[in-house]
Image (cartoon, rainbow, N blue to C red):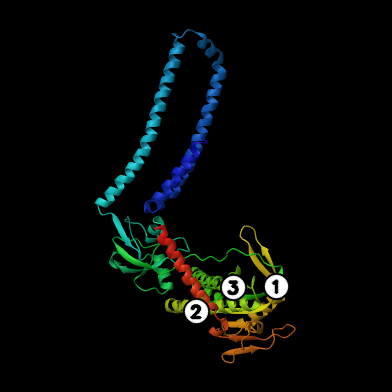
Amino acid sequence: MGLLAPGWMHGCLGLHFVLARRPLWSRVRFALFGAALLLPVLSALGFLEMGRELARESRVSGPSLIVEAEMPSHSAGADATLKAGLTMTRWRSGLLWGYLGIIGCAFGARSARTLVERGRRGLVTLSYPDRLVSVPRGWSVLEASRAFHISHGSSCGGRARCSTCRIRITAGVEFCPPPNADERATLEHIKAEPNVRLACQLRPSSDISFIPLVRTDRPIYRQTIPAVDADREIVLLFCDFTNRSVLEREHMAHDVLFVFTRYAESACGAIRDAGGTISYVAHDSICAIFGLTGSLAHASRQALAAANEIDQALHELNAGLDQRWGCKANIVVSIHAGHAALSHIGQGTETIVAAGKALEITHELRKVAARTSKSFAISSAVLTAVQTAPPVEDAVLIDHLGREPALSAYLMDYVPAGWTGNTQQKRKWRKRLDHASELIKTIVQA
């Protein structure tokens, strides 16, 4: 029984993955689950009962069997034993060949099904932007993406509770059945165009072409952490998603999560490219540290360059949000330079945390910035480190941040490109060199 149980579970899982897409399976799956659970249990009880019965018979007829075993081989008992042995051998051979036959039939049935579907034109061709796949009629677009390992967003798991799997039909709209109630409600909520459908619910009756509307590149929020000193002068950068709660009240939760993911991906990418280290990613904020190595002036330029890249990425994100959902993500970037204590925390995936006066001042700066309509809040300590003049236009001066000695900060709508020095130019050349290196590797491998 110990050997049969894993095989039984594996077979049940295989049937589920093969037949889960069929409508009939969804209606009878609970009854089949009960049968799949009770059958091995009842079989085990039957084996136990048979063992008890054999044990009782052996106790009752034990002496007579010993006498029969000592009789000559031509006795009736020996003949019966021989016949029983031959019968068991035939049963064992029959079961073995039957088991092998069932396996062969499974492979044969799969091949026969493929031939029948191709002969009857039972396959549907789905045209992705970069490839074509053929699937049995009745599959959803999301099921096809998963079967062929094609990246396709789906936050809710294919239950029409989000819109991250939506696609735009470019050809074959007439072969798409009308949306069901759940899909229609989601599409109406996001004010989708007529040719936009949810991939998890769309089961085309013939060939279609489409374009997925949601990116599925997975961001990397943490990278390898270098060794750090116990305390040093650093630059802290905070990105705060200030209107997350407002978006959650007006839009679907999965859509807000998608917005935060896109914003976090862009911000973390800009921070890593500029040379910073991600300290943590919270539900509405990101903390980054610059200056784990090198001078404070260089770290300040890196932080300002990252802020400039975040600003550009935010404009692109808001342009898409305004076009699709009529909303925008309000992000406030706060930057301060000062002395802080640093330490590694975590097991397996380590991260760096900061503590001290610099962190306290940065939190005060974040509170002041959140009450304004400006996108960037930069302390005078950062401008002093990069040896640049304070802004004279489109900036609001804060004389103190509630700390002694008094510290000024500037609130502005953008980061002047001149503040970053040649950091951005170096980053562009580094990206070009990385691209050339990847191209050379591809050519060599080919």
The spot of residue 318 in percent (x, y) is 48, 78
Q: Which residue lies furthest to the bottom in this view?
A: 392
Q: Nearer the viewer, mark 1 or mark 3?
A: 1
Q: Residue 232 carries which label?
A: 1
The spot of residue 99 in percent (x, y) is 39, 34
- Identity of the amino acid at label 1? Arg
Q: Classify residue 339 as left or right of residue 28.
A: right
Please, is residue 173 above or below residue 327 in the view? above
Q: Residue 261 carries which label?
A: none
Q: Which of marks 1 and 2 is in front?
A: 1
Residue drawn at x 71%, y 68% is 230
Front residue of 395 and 343:
343
User: Mark 3 = which residue?
Assistant: 285
Quick one: label 1 or label 2, which is nearer the N terminus?
A: 1
Callout count: 3
Mark 2: give few (<14), some (14-19) or many (20+) Cα within 10 Å: few
Rendered-image quadrant of the C terminus: bottom left
Q: Are marks 2 and 3 in contact (CB under 8 Å)?
A: no
Mark 1: give few (<14), some (14-19) or many (20+) Cα within 10 Å: some
Q: Are marks 1 and 2 in contact (CB under 8 Å)?
A: no
Image quadrant where residue 341 sits: bottom right
Residue drawn at x 57%, y 19% is 59
User: Mark 2 = which residue?
Assistant: 312
Quick one: label 1 or label 3, which is nearer the N terminus?
A: 1
- Identity of the amino acid at label 2? Gln
